[in-house]
C-alpha cells in the first residue's frame, strides 16, 4: 500500500513543498500481489528475479527476564530476491511502477544474507528500461560502494569508494538526486557525493541485486518534488488571475472511459471520478449548467487546436441576484478560453 503525505520539508535539499511516499512491506504480506505496484526487471542474463515478501526473524530489543528464559524473536515482513543463480552478468531488479521521480531522496533498509559469487544490495534510480538506468550498489565481498550508469546494456562512468559492511546485519542506504548532483549515504553517513552528467533527468526507482546474492530489503521511504502536470499549472495560473473562483477542475477520460480529475483548485480532488456531465462534455462537446445555493456551476469542453474536445472543465462561481444561465455561461467561457489558448492537444495537459 502506498502512503502519501504532502508537507513542507525543511531540509536544504527540497525547500519547496515535497511529497513523501512510504513503502511498507507489511502491507504486502497478506494476499497482496507485488505486481500491483512493482515490475520485475532483469539486466544482463540468467533467470529473472524471484521477488517475494517473507518474514525475517529479528531478536527482540528487550532482554530475557531471567538467564534461563529463551531469547524473544520478532518476525518482520521483508522483501527478498530468492533465486540464487550464480551468473556473474545477472542483475535482478524490482522496479516501483507507480511513480516517476526527478529530484528525490530514497532511503531503504537492507540486509545481505548470503551469496557465494556475490553479496550485493543496491538502489536503481532514473530507470528507463532494463538497459538504461543508474544504480548505487554495495558489495560485502568487495568491500565497496559503487555508482554506475547502465547505458544501452553497458556499465559506464563508475565511481567507487571503500565501504565495509557486515553481512547478516541491517544497514541503511540512501540516495539523493537533485539535477546532476547525486549523494549517497550509508548508515546515515555521507559516503559518496558526486556530480555526473545528466544522461537521464528522471525515471523510476527500485531494488537491485546481482548474481546469487540473497538480500533482504526493509521498509522504504521516498521524498520527492512532485512534477506538476500542465493541467495543474493551467488551473493555478487561472486561480492567480481569478482568485474568487469557488472551484475549478479539469477532467480527462481514464483507460476505462471514466472521467477523472487531473487538476483542481483542491488537491484532494485529483483522481476523483466525474459524472455523466463531464463525460458528455468530453465525448460530445456538450455544456452543462447547474445552480446551487448562492452558486452556479458550468461544465464545458476544453478543445484542442482542431476544435475537438480533449477534456472537460468544471467552473464553480458565486452567483449574484438575478443571474441568468446565459450570464453564468459567459463567465465560465471566459475562464475556459484563457485555458484553451495554451492547449494544443490532450498530451499538453498531461505533460
Image (tube, grey):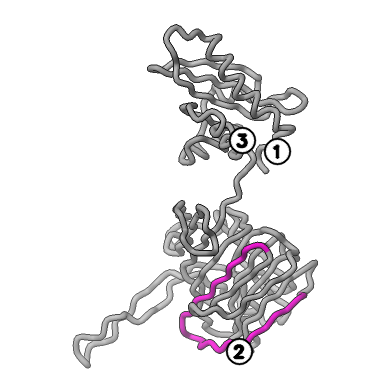
Distance of label 1 from label 3 (alpha carbons): 11 Å
Q: Can you tell which mark lies on residue 143?
A: 2
Which callout, 2 or 1, points to the residue nearer the camera? 1
Residue at 78%, 69% in the rendered image: 153
Residue under label 1, please give it. 348
* Cα distance between the residues tagged 3 and 2: 51 Å
Magenta run includes residue 215: no
> Mark 1 and 3 residues: CB-CB less than 8 Å, in contact?
no
- Work out whether mark 2 precedes mark 1 in sequence or the reverse, and give the earlier one: 2
Q: Quadrant of residue 36?
A: bottom right
Residue 88 in the image, given as x and y percentages of width and height? 71, 82
Q: Residue 35 carries which label?
A: none
Outermost residue to the front: 241
- Toward the left, the furthest residue is 66
Give the residue displayed 55% in from the left and 85% down from the top.
114
Look at the image and tell me in which quarter the C terminus lies: top right
Image: 2 above or below 207 = above
Magenta highlight on residue 162: yes
Badge 1 element: helix
- Mark 3 vs mark 2, foreground winner is 3
Q: What stretch is highlighted in magenta?
A: 156-179
Residue 223 or residue 77, whichever sits in front: 223
Which residue corresponds to the image point at 45% horizontal and 53% vertical from the top-left? 7
- Residue found at the far bottom of this picture: 67
| Label 1 or label 3, whichever comes before in sequence order | 3
SS class of the residue under badge 3? helix
Q: Residues within 10 Å of mark 3 (few under 14, many from 20)?
A: many
For disc 3, the marked residue is 234
Residue 319 picture location, percent across and down: 45, 16
Question: How far apart in space, not on screen, are marks 2 and 1 (Cα)?
Answer: 48 Å
Q: What element carries label 2?
A: loop
Q: Which residue is drawn at 55% across and 16% down?
A: 288
Amino acid at each position: 500500500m502506498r502512503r502519501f503525505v504532502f508537507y513542507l520539508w525543511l531540509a536544504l535539499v527540497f525547500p519547496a513543498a515535497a511529497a513523501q511516499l512510504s513503502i511498507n512491506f507489511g502491507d504486502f504480506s497478506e494476499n497482496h500481489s507485488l505486481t500491483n505496484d512493482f515490475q520485475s526487471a532483469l539486466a544482463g542474463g540468467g533467470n529473472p528475479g524471484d521477488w517475494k515478501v517473507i518474514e525475517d526473524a529479528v531478536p527482540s530489543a528487550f532482554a530475557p527476564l531471567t538467564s534461563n528464559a529463551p531469547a524473544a524473536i520478532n518476525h518482520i515482513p521483508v522483501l527478498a530476491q530468492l533465486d540464487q543463480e550464480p551468473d556473474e552478468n545477472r542483475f535482478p531488479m524490482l522496479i516501483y511502477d507507480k511513480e516517476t521521480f526527478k529530484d528525490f531522496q530514497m532511503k531503504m533498509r537492507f540486509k545481505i544474507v548470503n551469496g557465494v559469487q556475490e553479496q550485493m544490495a543496491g538502489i536503481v534510480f532514473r530507470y528507463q528500461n532494463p538497459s538504461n538506468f543508474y544504480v548505487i550498489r554495495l558489495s560485502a565481498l568487495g568491500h565497496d560502494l559503487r555508482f554506475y550508469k547502465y547505458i544501452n546494456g553497458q556499465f559506464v562512468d563508475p565511481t567507487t569508494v571503500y565501504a565495509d559492511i557486515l553481512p547478516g546485519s541491517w544497514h541503511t542506504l540512501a540516495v539523493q538526486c537533485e539535477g546532476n548532483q547525486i549523494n549517497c549515504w550509508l548508515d546515515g553517513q555521507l559516503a559518496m557525493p558526486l556530480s555526473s552528467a545528466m544522461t537521464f533527468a528522471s525515471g523510476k526507482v527500485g531494488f537491485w541485486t546481482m548474481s546469487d546474492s540473497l538480500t533482504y530489503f526493509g521498509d522504504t521511504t521516498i521524498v520527492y518534488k512532485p512534477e506538476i502536470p500542465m493541467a495543474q499549472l493551467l488551473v493555478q495560473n487561472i486561480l492567480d488571475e481569478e482568485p474568487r473562483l469557488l472551484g475549478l477542475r479539469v477532467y480527462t477520460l481514464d483507460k476505462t472511459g471514466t472521467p477523472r480529475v487531473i487538476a483542481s483548485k483542491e488537491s484532494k480532488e485529483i483522481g476523483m471520478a466525474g459524472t455523466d456531465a463531464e463525460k458528455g462534455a468530453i465525448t460530445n462537446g456538450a455544456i452543462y449548467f447547474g445552480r446551487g445555493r448562492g452558486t452556479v456551476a458550468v461544465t464545458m469542453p476544453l478543445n484542442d487546436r482542431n476544435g475537438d474536445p480533449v477534456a472537460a472543465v468544471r467552473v464553480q462561481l458565486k452567483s449574484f441576484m438575478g443571474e441568468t444561465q446565459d450570464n453564468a455561461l459567459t463567465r465560465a467561457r471566459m475562464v475556459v478560453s484563457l485555458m484553451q489558448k495554451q492547449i494544443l492537444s490532450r498530451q499538453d495537459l498531461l505533460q
